[in-house]
Amino acid sequence: MKKNKNYISYSDGIRAAKKYCLKNYKNFIILGQGVTSPWYVGSTMTDLDKDFSKRVIETPVSESSSTSIAFGASLVGVKSLIVHPRMDFMLYAMDSIVNHISKWSLMFGEKIKSPVTIRAIINRGNEQGAQHSQSLHSWFMHIPGLKIVMPSSANNARDLLISSIISNDPVIFIDDRWLYECTEVKRKIKIYDLNKYENKKIVNGKDITIISTGYCTRISNEAIKILNEKYSIFPELIDISLLSNLPINIIEKSLKKTGKILCIEGGWEVCSLSSEVFSKLFVRKNNFKKDIVASKINLFNSAAPASSKLEKHYYPNRNNIIKKVLNIINK
């Protein structure tokens, strides 16, 4: 089936970003495990190894070694994208990421940069179980020196991946395979300075503020359409695509209007994105004229199940978002 050129899928956006950088930046390389295999990376690398063979490098199954190579290359002027097809096993590279890549610029007074972009892919569902299904975004939010990017749409994924690659700072770019087939109208490429990037309100509303990131932004959008049409409830939706040094102004502004907030993410509750949002809002509680109603949807405090029936209850979905919003509104 021929693709409509006016639309772009999330996976096409990821591929377009890589092609853009390979074409325009001769000092840019892509390396990692499975970068030439659709089984590992879907269609996000299709034919790039043929068009840019010397700068698309398949590595052995050694997350630590390949990440260290990317780091070393960055120190001699090579911008690199290291691909980890499963975020779970990126943990083998934690020494390189946490003790070296994130800290190098800080240890040398920002005179030496380590512009490595680490693409961490979330795989979930299909009975993949506890060791192959984790979204560990909040782990990396804790580390100084790293920028954490987690887009929710095709255009944003393309633009933020380009912006991450050309940035002089190390970036953890988290993408979710549940988003790969999601499409939207294609718009022109927009490149951001990640130091000035602002998270965006993508749905206007008045009854409750919903905060989400990645795939959860998509299902929140689906839930909002049903809440609009069936219940005449109009949530405001803020998409958190940049998680590091989380800016709170846009959330505070929305919350002053709605008085209610619901945070939704695909990670566990303790030390989570939602915990960070609520912590920052609590510090600013005197800015609000009345008490706010706050709630969140996270994963259960348990490892992911390997049963498809249990998975339906484990991960956030639009139905439990609708139920939670109705409970908050009707209190």
Image: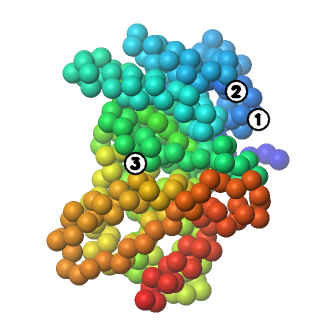
Dot 1 lies on which element? helix
Q: Eyeballing the image, is 237 above or below 144?
A: below
**Residue reaching furthest to the bottom:** 330
Measure the alpha-carbon separation of dots 3 and 2. Answer: 27 Å
* Number of disc labels: 3
User: Residue at 55% of width from left, 59% of height from top?
Assistant: 301
Identify the residue under disc 3.
Answer: 243
Residue 129: which disc? Answer: none
* Residue extending furthest toward the left: 286
Residue 101 appears in the picture as rendered: yes
**Which numbered disc flags the more N-terminal residue, 3 or 2?**
2
Question: How many neighbours does mark 3 have within 10 angstroms: few (below 14), some (14-19), or many (20 or more)?
Answer: many
Q: Are marks 2 and 1 in contact (CB under 8 Å)?
A: yes
Disc 2 marks a residue whose amino acid type is Gly
Query: Which label number is shown at residue 34?
Result: 2
Return the x and y of residue 316 as percentages of the image width and height: 59, 64
**Circle 3: element type:** loop
Q: Amino acid at mark 3?
A: Leu
The answer to which of 76 and 181 lies nearer the viewer is: 76
Q: Which is nearer the eye, 186 or 212?
A: 212
Classed neighbour count for the residue bearing mark 1: other residues with Cα under 10 Å, few (<14), some (14–19), many (≥20): few
Can residue 189 be seen from the camera position used here?
no
Q: How is the image coloured?
A: rainbow
Residue 231 located left or right of residue 165: right
Sequence-earlier tag: 3 or 1? 1
Q: Amino acid at mark 1?
A: Trp
